[in-house]
Image: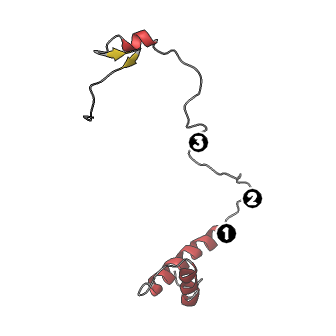
């Protein structure tokens, strides 16, 4: 894009506020930010009066598992294949020698 929507001084000020070192990249960043702002200007020309607001575009409504109660194993069933248990709990050999 040929129009400059942001100056080098503004880019330097933004970088300073964000505590970013952009030495040697000012011209490149000025061009990139100007191009981005130019695309936004193009979007402002579109009639969006009949377009509804959105905050999510994937169509997902609930990505979490349902918290409902499900059938589970009894303690005896869970321990039935255990080679060693102690007082109704799984038991293993010690990992550390104490």
Q: Give the numbered dot on residue 44.
A: 1
Q: Residue furthest front?
A: 98
Of the residues tagged 1 and 3, which is closer to the observer?
3
Disc 2 from disc 1: Cα separation: 11 Å
* Other residues around mark 2 within 10 Å, as few (<14) / some (14–19) / many (≥20): few
> In the displayed structure, does residue 44 sit left or right of residue 71?
right
Q: Position of residue 12 (x, y in %)?
A: 54, 86
Residue name at image x 63 percent, y 67 percent: 43
* Other residues around mark 3 within 10 Å, as few (<14) / some (14–19) / many (≥20): few
Given residues 73 and 64, the one toward you in this image is 73
Residue name at image x 54 percent, y 89 percent: 8
Disc 3 from disc 2: Cα separation: 22 Å
Residue name at image x 59 percent, y 23 percent: 68
Q: Which residue is mark 3?
A: 59
Q: Earlier in the sequence, mark 1 or mark 3?
A: 1
- Disc 1 secondary structure class: helix
Regarding residue 4, the answer to whether it shows in the image is no
Q: Residue furthest left?
A: 97
Q: Quadrant of residue 4?
A: bottom right
Q: Which residue is mark 2?
A: 49
Q: Quadrant of residue 6?
A: bottom right
Q: Give the quadrant of the C terminus.
A: top left
Above or below 93: residue 17:
below
- Disc 2 secondary structure class: loop
Q: Give the numbered dot on residue 75.
A: none
């Amino acid at each position: 894009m040929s129009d400059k929507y942001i100056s080098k001084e503004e880019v330097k000020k933004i970088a300073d506020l964000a505590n970013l070192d952009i030495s040697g990249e000012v011209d490149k960043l000025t061009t990139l930010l100007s191009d981005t702002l130019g695309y936004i200007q193009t979007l402002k020309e579109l009639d969006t009066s009949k377009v509804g607001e959105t905050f999510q575009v994937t169509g997902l409504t609930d990505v979490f598992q349902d918290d409902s109660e499900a059938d589970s194993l009894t303690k005896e069933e869970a321990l039935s294949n255990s080679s060693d248990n102690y007082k109704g709990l799984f038991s293993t050999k010690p990992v550390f020698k104490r």
